[in-house]
Image: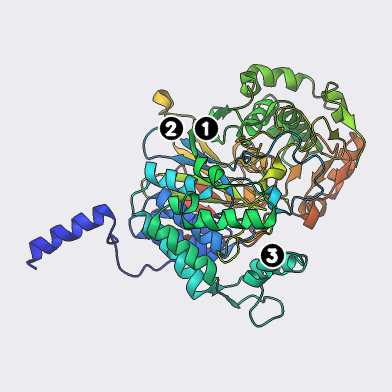
Amino acid sequence: MPLRLSLVVLVVLSIRGAVPAQAAEPKIRTGSTLVAKQGMVVTVSEPASRVGAEILHQGGNAVDAAVASAFALAVTWPEAGNIGGGGFMLVKPVEGPPVLVDYREVAPLAAGRDTFVSDTTALSHRAVGVPGTVRGLALAHEKFGKLPWKALVQPSVKLAKDGFPVSVALAKSINRVLGTSKNFEELRRVYGKPSGGVWQAGDTMKLPDLAATLEILAEQGPDAFYTGPIAKALVAEMREGKGLIVAEDLANYSAKLREPQHGTFRGHHIYSSSPPAGGIVLIEMLNILEQFDLKKYGRWSPETLHVMAEASRRAYCDRARYLADPQFVTIPERLATKEYAQELAKTIDLKQATRSASLAPEIPLGPEGASTTHFSVIDKDGMAVANTYTLEESFGSRVVVRGSGFILNNEMGDFNWQPGKTTRGGQIGTEPNIVAPGKRMLSSQTPTMVFAPGENGKNGEPGRILLITGSPGGRTIINTVTCVVMNVLEFDLPARAAVDAPRQHQQWFPDSLTLESGLHRDHPELAKALQGLGHRVTSPTNNTQGDAHTIWINPKTGEYHGIADQRREGVAASW
Ligand code: DON
């Protein structure tokens, strides 16, 4: 082929993405903290971060990388990475304001108000919501992606087929679930170590059934999951295990493009996930916190921790009162307003903790009777993605679709199962989030971006991007994101320190304040002072809160700082 012609062919193919623009073997760099200008991917799992960085290097944009990393995490981080779950992807296109892709699961048509009143476990086929991940990733790709779909799914096929090295965190995660999954034979068959015994860091894990399923997705596209062979296998699994999902549920599922939740904090623009997700609670809290001069007290003062806990208490109470799928309930607009925050701020007593029960006397309190993963991506043009997705609990329902190698969520557990039963222990039975067919369950997922006070504030364009963050951790997610955002915006902590810093959590009920172990270690006087103000101070299960894989963008140099949270040994990747 003459040189000119071959150049033309190469250019055309590159534009279509069929041939990587820079086909040379990329020298991927990885680390817990990484600085680069040309692109960054930060996830909980090294192979998945690497896949995203390779896609960027090949000329893919941030959404391409996010889709590829999401599929890779479904292989390499099975407790939460998934194709059988759902989540929320916040995208900042190169131009224009951010957009939210809502791919939350929905209740099957057979589920209703009283379906779960007598259920005692969410580890069952019944607790599986109609999965949204594949439609969500496909919608993001269709709207914003550049490379072909197949190129984004193939890396995960390869990981599952050829195998990948087990990390310390993965070994721990899998050994823990296998140890308590006697009744989940397919999970044990698929994830058990073929030679027997427990997984060790450095072992190679291969997932041939999942490789075959991903191959079908790569070849046939997302419909394979909703109306094709994967749907068939899923429905058969449901029939066998007495689950609720039928073919019509899958065929009906659609992911949605939503306007994200928007707010400001001292002029900075905050974009996050709108209902049914957690961003509105984040905005309500930040609005309350803006009413106080917390800088004056200092980050590690009892006053700051107290005010943050009181803001959480009020916003989480409103969450229980009002929040659910906006298609089914009307969410009061005032929740995210500054005026409302001013009213709430006035009810905070600096000398004493409010009792949670006093905030919502109208919610009757009965007698007493968490895995997700977040990743952040940015490309050379400034397109950014904050993606949080989940199976709900670690390994979801623990149901693996027989022969297909993928795990199903147990997201139905995020609905209020027992209408009217709200307890001091934290069970919520309020009306908005009661089960209904086709309804999305309320979520705490809070993928978030922060932008500078905007030189481009008009025309819906926020200012320059400063921070991309989010976290797992069930209801703690919103407080984790609040901590990271406050650490950067209010307390000027360097990004690494902002992610490392110990976190706190208050969620209305239980009426307690949870402090990460680092806080007890580094500031032992604080717990005592907070008890003195009337808080019941506790520690989180496993002593840690969240896993916030974050990117900070240096406003002076424009450099991308990948800050992988080390609570589960996350990894930033670039080249
Ligand atoms: O969407 C939600 O709010 C929950 N299903 C998230 C669960 C979770 O983060 C558990 N993980 N660590």
Q: Does ligand 1 reach within 8 Å of label 2's beta carbon?
A: no
Q: Earlier in the sequence, mark 3 or mark 2?
A: 2
Residue 80 lies in quadrant: bottom right
**Disc 2 residue type?**
Pro
Helix, strand or loop under label 3: helix
**Disc 3 residue type?**
Ser
Residue 457 picture location, percent across and down: 44, 26
Residue in the picture at 86% in, 22% down = 361
Looking at the image, residue 370 sits to the left or right of residue 194; the answer is right
Q: Which residue is mark 1?
A: 260
Residue in the picture at 40% in, 39% down = 93
In the image, residue 109 above or below residue 177: above
Q: In this view of the protein, can residue 104 be seen by the observer?
A: yes
Quadrant in which the C terminus appears: bottom left
Q: Which residue is mark 3?
A: 173
In the image, residue 119 above or below residue 324: below
Q: Which residue is mark 2?
A: 97
**Disc 1 residue type?**
Pro
Residue 564 picture location, percent across and down: 58, 56
Instruction: Compute the Cα span from label 3 to label 2.
Output: 37 Å
